[in-house]
Structure formats: C-alpha cells, structure tokens
Amino acid sequence: MANKRAFEIAFVGLKPGVHEFNYELDDKFFIEKGAEDFANAKADVKLSLEKNTGFMLLKFEVGGKADVSCDRCGNSLTMDLWDEFKLVVKLVDNPDEMNLNEEDPDVFYISRTESHLEVSDWLYEFVLLSVPTQKMCGEDERGGSKCNKEVLEKLRQMEVKEEHNANTLWKGLDKFKEN
Ligand SMILES: [Zn+2]
C-alpha cells in the first residue's frame, strides 16, 4: 500500500451516474490490515459507484484467489474468491449518530461536507467474506478425503482419549451416587 490515497475516492468531483474502480489487492494489503489464515492472496475487486443526489450506491465484485487452512486437517488450500456486495452510502448532517442507530449493515452514513470516500476497510472486509464458509480439502478421484491422514489420525486418537476420560468420570460419579 505505497499510496494510501489509492483507496480514497474523491466522489465530489464525479458526475452523477456510474463510475468504475478496479483494485488489485495482494498479501501485503491483507497482512497490514491484520488478516489471519489468509496467505498468497491475489484479489481483484471491481467497484461500481453510482452517484446520486444525497446518496451513492456501491457494488463490490470480488474475484481472485487466496490460501486458507482446511477446517478438518489444517492443510493449506487455495480457494477461489467470488462474491458480490452492495452498500448504500448516504450523505447526512449527523453521520456518527446515524451510523450508531442504523441496524442495516448495508447502509452507511457520511457527512454532507465530506468529499472523499475511504474504501479500504470495505475492500478488506468484503474480500474476507468472499472465502467459502466450508473450507475442506475435498475428495480424490476415488472419493476419498484429500485431508492430511496423519493429522486426522492424531485428532481421532485425541477424541478417543477424551471419550475415555469422560467415561471414567461418569463411572466415578455413578459410584458416588450409589453410596
Ligand atoms: Zn483437510
């Protein structure tokens, strides 16, 4: 992020109508913003901004790829990023108060005196939301799980042990009741 202003849109100077902005975001951008479990990211976001009197409609179209960890075994997985988000930005006199009371997450208020729109936080948030919620290694040609078998075996052993401990605890309690 050499140029911080790269994420500021000077909307005051824009004519009414739709304007398009393209952002290419790499690892550096996400690391600076504190992303975890999100490596080798290469995200493209197309932002369409429709300028109207008193409000703007923003549409973020996310594409690209990033590496995340499998939910089951922790293996690194490359995931396609693909999603779309819409936002309404309204120009008002009291944006802080309005933002506090607004329950719709897709509506955001800025001051009427504002001239720039800072979009980096939205870019960050929407790209992270574009990661599929199910992060799994998937299956090989024969329908077997491609998860790391060693890790799964370790997890299984830990579960068996926990179950065993829980059983012993219950037995102990039963004894206690009988007495
Ligand atoms: Zn896995």
Image (tube, rainbow, N blue to C red):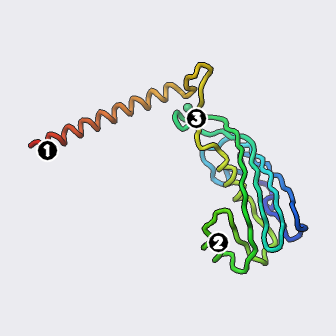
Q: Nearer the viewer, residue 5 or 58?
A: 58
If you read the primary sequence from the N terminus, does the residue marked by circle 3 or circle 1 appear first? 3
Residue at the far right in the pictured view = 15
Whether tag 3 and tag 1 are in contact, CB under 8 A, the answer is: no
If you read the primary sequence from the N terminus, does the residue marked by circle 3 or circle 2 appear first? 2
Alpha carbon distance from label 1 to label 2: 57 Å
Residue 133 found in image quarter = top right
- Relative to 76, is 7 above or below? below
Residue at the (70%, 58%) spot, across then down: 122
Q: Quadrant of the C terminus?
A: top left
**23 lies left or right of 167:** right
Residue at image mark 2: 99
Q: Nearer the viewer, residue 75 or 12?
A: 12
If you read the primary sequence from the N terminus, does the residue marked by circle 1 or circle 2 appear first? 2
Alpha carbon distance from label 3 to label 2: 37 Å
Residue 145 found in image quarter = top right
Residue 177 is marked as 1
Residue at the (82%, 61%) spot, across then down: 49
Could you classify mark 3 by the number of other residues whose Cα lies within 10 Å: few (under 14), some (14-19), or many (20 or more)? Answer: many
Amino acid bearing label 1 = Lys
Amino acid bearing label 3 = Met
Residue at image mark 3: 136
Q: Is mark 3 within 8 Å of ligand 1?
A: yes
Q: Nearer the viewer, residue 27 or 137?
A: 137
